[in-house]
Image (spheres, helix red, strand yellow):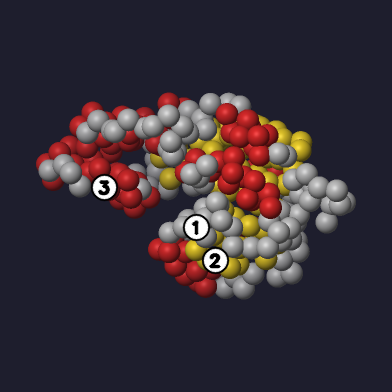
Amino acid sequence: MFHPVTEAVIEEARIAPGHAVLDVGTGSGEPALSIAEVVGPSGLVVGIDPMPGMIAAAERAAHDRHFENARFQVGSADRVPFEAERFHAVVSRFGIMFFPSPVECVRELLRVLKPNRPISLAVWGYIERNPFHHNLARVVDRYLPREPVPPDGPDPFRFAEPGKLLSVVNAAGVGQASERLLRFNIEVPFAGEDFWALRLDMSDKLRTRLSSLSAEKVGEIRREVIQDLASYSTGSGVSFPAEVLIVSATNLGDRAES
């Protein structure tokens, strides 16, 4: 569903065959597995995530696709388990919104990045412009108002405001920082109950919130969410317009690009 974002991150990170790439907050293995195809057998992609369950899922996916150039291990952005200047590129798709201290974490990612090489980060734009998230959230919020998010606390839309993540990256000490808006469509090849199951599978937070409601209330939410899909129907599934910000920068260094 998020392949256009993966393509944009790969392009901005200038990933090429033979490169060693770090994917931070890899989840169940993307975009690391897509990057593995780009770097080829002479390259390497390493995905880290703080959740052991996610790493186990990523390892299974790599095994099923016979990728020998993809490695996964538990790790977090504030303490990357690699030596300095290890990677040709560092990427994170929908990860930095949850970093405990974004500026310090970006500095840690720069530490393991070769001089004059790129870091590329993808974050969600405004929730109102991302109905894949917004339509579900507004239904659930009517039944169960969410707890206020602390100012600048971890949240999927923490860096939705243009320029906010760019300021973080610049504060970390980089060169040639840039931001671009990526508009694309999230294509889901099914709807109805299958879409509801997908959204539940994607979010521990959603499952936790719904667990406090009665089965009857959850059923009402499910019916409303499925009903709202009609305006995005394609006949073979649903298609949601989406907006993502891609922020990229080059690691400062004295040596020529590797």
Disc 3, SS: helix
- Amino acid type at mark 3: Thr
Disc 2, SS: strand
As drawn, 77 above or below 132: below
Q: Quadrant of residue 136?
A: top left
Could you tell me if the residues under marks 1 and 3 are in contact, i.e. CB atoms within 8 Å?
Answer: no
| 45 with respect to 137 (left or right) | right
As drawn, 32 above or below 134: below
- Amino acid type at mark 2: Phe
Residue indicated by mark 3 = 208
Could you tell me if the residues under marks 2 and 3 are in contact, i.e. CB atoms within 8 Å?
Answer: no
Label annotation for residue 72: 2
Residue 99: percent from left, percent from top = 50, 45
- Of all residues, the one furthest to the right in this rendering is 256
Residue 248: percent from left, percent from top = 68, 40
Task: Identify the image quadrant of the C terminus.
Answer: bottom right
Residue indicated by mark 1 = 49
- The residue depicted at 52 percent of the width and 33 percent of the height is 159
Could you tell me if the residues under marks 1 and 2 are in contact, i.e. CB atoms within 8 Å?
Answer: yes
Q: CA distance from mark 2 to mark 3?
A: 27 Å
- The residue depicted at 68 percent of the width and 63 percent of the height is 83
